[in-house]
Image (cartoon, rainbow, N blue to C red):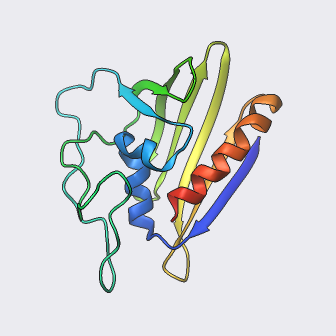
Amino acid sequence: MVFLDASGPAPPQVCWERYAVPAAWPTWAPQIHAVTLADVPVGVRRQAAVPVGSGAGGTPSPPGWPGARRAPATEVRIFPGLRGRIRGLFPPTARFVITAVDETDRTWSWQVGVGPLRLELDHGVDACLDGGTSAWLRITAPALAIRAYAPIARAALRRLVR
């Protein structure tokens, strides 16, 4: 197991929205090029058009939402049981299932698998005293997988909080 974190100027709610909307993952996670969700049940809460910025002058839209002050109105939010696939730069795709989400605490967990390899990833977003955010990740996986994934995950966390 390894614990990684990064701090940056983006407000906590902006960072949480980047986590909570799978369609936004490729905008800050360089290892993710596309996300395909499995069938989403009718009635699943979709992303409401909520403001992403706050403070004097507002905050720029997250990358991938060009010119918008709001998240896309039709994107599915993470929820326990949500399944899908992640396409990276190289095959194969990785399958995933969201195992826990706490919108109030801004934490979530998921399991990601490629072939026989399984990673358990716990994520969180915490407010910093300066108005920015500390985002963290706990990775539980075989040591070689952690060693290979940790540098990429660090880069993603830094982009998440920018």
Which residue extends farthest top? 115
The residue under the point 48% across, 79% down is: 131
Classify residue 143 by image quadrant.
Answer: top right
Q: As displayed, is residue 30 above or below residue 7? A: above
The residue under the point 32% across, 63% down is: 61
Q: Nearer the viewer, residue 149 or 134?
A: 149
On the rendered structure, is 116 left or right of 142?
left
Which residue extends farthest bottom? 56
Q: Position of residue 141 (x, y in %)?
A: 73, 31
Q: Position of residue 76 (x, y in %)?
A: 28, 39
Classify residue 46 by image quadrant.
Answer: top left
On the rendered structure, is 106 left or right of 73?
right
On the rendered structure, is 3 left or right of 25?
right
Q: Position of residue 133 (x, y in %)?
A: 53, 69
The residue under the point 54% across, 57% down is: 159
The answer, for residue 82, to whether it is visible in the render is no
The residue under the point 39% across, 63% down is: 14
Q: Quadrant of the N terminus?
A: top right
Q: As displayed, is residue 159 above or below residue 143? A: below
Count all numbered tags in the image, as a single digit.
Answer: 0
Classify residue 90 by image quadrant.
Answer: top right
Q: As displayed, is residue 20 above or below residue 129? A: above
The answer, for residue 88, to whether it is visible in the render is yes
